[in-house]
Amino acid sequence: EVQLVESGGGLIQPGGSLRLSCAASGFAFGSYNMNWVRQAPGQGLEWVSYIESGGGTIYYADSVKGRFTISRDNAGNSLYLQMNSLKAGDTGVYYCTTSGSKYFDSWGQGTLVTVSS
Amino acid sequence: DIQMTQSPSSLSASVGDRVTITCRASQNINRYLNWYQQKPGKAPKVLIYAASSLQSGVPSRFSGSGSGTAFTLIISSLQPEDVATYHCQQSDSMPWTFGQGTKVEIK
């Protein structure tokens, strides 16, 4: 059974940094492209970042480019999102997802990030 | 970026009703359109991918159609467990983008 478990969320002041983690199990993590997708409170879904299975291709949404960094450890079955210069608009639930075939086929339960003073 | 527009933003229907949700793309996305169901307080799950392919385990009352810029999600007979928000998403080109969501309630 595919399991994705996010961690690392919390309350952080504007301008601060957080590192989200996603622990993967139940599938061949190193063979899957991965993403972060977020959802602001009461709002729709927003794709944030993508990393190819081998880590060679990475994309970011314009809203986070230059502030967020996605990475992965295939030996440790983990995905990461380093978030710097956080803004109030970054508040929301962050989901780790797989995208084996150009859609988000598995999702974690999410981790809440709150950016507030 | 490709803009995705869903309609309606919310709807209320009776159990057993046929429900139709539409999603329009601001440019041609071929058939790279996916539908997700999100129940309150839960993570989304994929229902339909590539416009009309039913994800394994999803009830057959859900179906999708369309290509190019216009797409439709149909629930053929609404059930109480279908109360949720439904999101469309294009995966034709980066950045992948979502519609704003359609909230479905039981009348």
Image (cartoon, grey):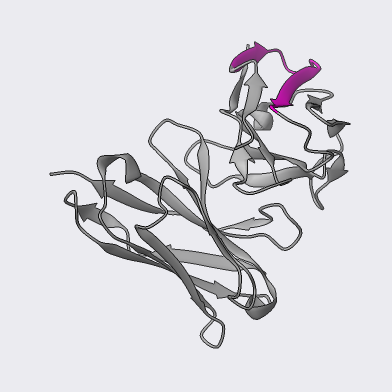
> Looking at the image, which residue is at 59% across and 65% down?
A34
Q: Position of residue A49 (x, y in %)?
A: 51, 57
Q: Position of residue A40 (x, y in %)?
A: 40, 38
Among the 4 quarters of the image, the one containing residue B24? top right
Q: Is residue A91 visible?
A: no
Among the 4 quarters of the image, the one containing residue B11? top right
Q: Quadrant of the C terminus of chain A?
A: top left
Among the 4 quarters of the image, the one containing residue B65? top right
> Looking at the image, which residue is at 64% across and 24% down?
B5
> Looking at the image, which residue is at 63% across and 49% down?
B94
| Relative vertical location of residue A62 with respect to residue B74 in this rendering, above or below | below
Q: Position of residue A79 (x, y in %)?
A: 49, 71
Say if the magenta span includes residue B12: yes
Q: Nearer the viewer, residue B27 or A32?
A: B27
Q: Position of residue B40 (x, y in %)?
A: 51, 35
| Badge count | 0
Q: Quadrant of the N terminus of chain A?
A: bottom right
| Relative vertical location of residue A31 with respect to residue B94 in this rendering, above or below | below
| Relative vertical location of residue A111 with respect to residue B105 in this rendering, above or below | below
Q: Nearer the viewer, residue A68 or B47?
A: A68
> Looking at the image, which residue is at 65% across and 38% down?
B37
Q: Main secondary structure of the magenta part?
A: strand
Say if the magenta span includes residue A87: no
Q: Is residue A101 visible?
A: yes
Q: Which residues are magenta?
A: B10-26
